[in-house]
Image (cartoon, rainbow, N blue to C red):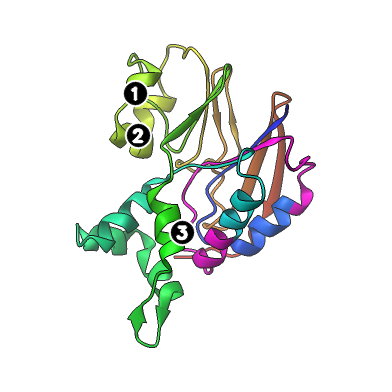
Amino acid sequence: MRIFAIGDIHGCAEALEKLLGRLPVDWGADLVIFLGDYIDRGPEPRRVIEKVMELRKLYPERVIALRGNHEWMFLRYLRGIEPEVFLFNGGEATLRAYYREGKLDIPEEHRTFLEGLPLYYETEDYFFVHAGVRPERPLHNQEEEDLLWIREGFYYYPGTFPKKIVFGHTPFPEPLLLPDRLGIDTGCVYGGKLTAIELPAEKIYQVECPRRWP
């Protein structure tokens, strides 16, 4: 079984569809894992969510969608928790996508999808997560904050991890390919690229994102 992991999309639906068209996925047999951050900043966050939901429905055992920190912020916004944090981090783009006739209208199916996103997915050899893990803490005993938010303390860690950690969250100019860390957020929404990695071959697939969004 091959695994394809896809980095942060941030509302760049056109780039996502182009990338999916280039991936040599055997749908229903290969495993496809989205690393979170489907929304905010980019132009079409609702379209991205609908595409991921569509794939989940078609291949429920072979498409995994993880939670990113932006989905976490959005759910908190909907509960009235720190709305300014969500808006500061590009949330207005998501709100615009869900406004209908002057009010926020989020389909229950979308809300259920967002609320049900897991924090990580694990195989015998890999640990897939949005941001990373806290070093020297067992993989099965990580905290939500680190899984969604950690940066330098994870990818600068001089030690080694028991499994290869495949992550997004922190944009790099090119994929970070270390023996035990594979970072595939390459700043799509900032005018970079949308990246996927095929495992275990560690083959990279990318599409250009020519425009930088707020």
Q: Which residue is label 2 attached to? A: 150
Q: Which of 121 and 36 is in front in this view?
A: 121
Q: Which residue is label 1 attached to? A: 134
Q: Is residue 96 left or right of residue 205?
A: left
* Residue stretch in magenta: 21-50
Verify CB contact (< 8 Å) between mark 2 and mark 1: yes
| Location of residue 82 (image quadrant) | bottom left
Q: Which of 126 and 92 is in front in this view?
A: 126
Q: Is mark 1 on a helix, strand or loop?
A: loop
| 2 vs 3, front mark | 3
Q: Which residue is label 3 attached to? A: 39
Looking at the rendered structure, the kind of residue marked 2 is Ile
Q: What element carries label 2?
A: loop
Residue depicted at 37% across the width and 51% down the height: 115
Q: Nearer the viewer, residue 29 or 207?
A: 29
Residue depicted at 57% across the width and 58% down the height: 191
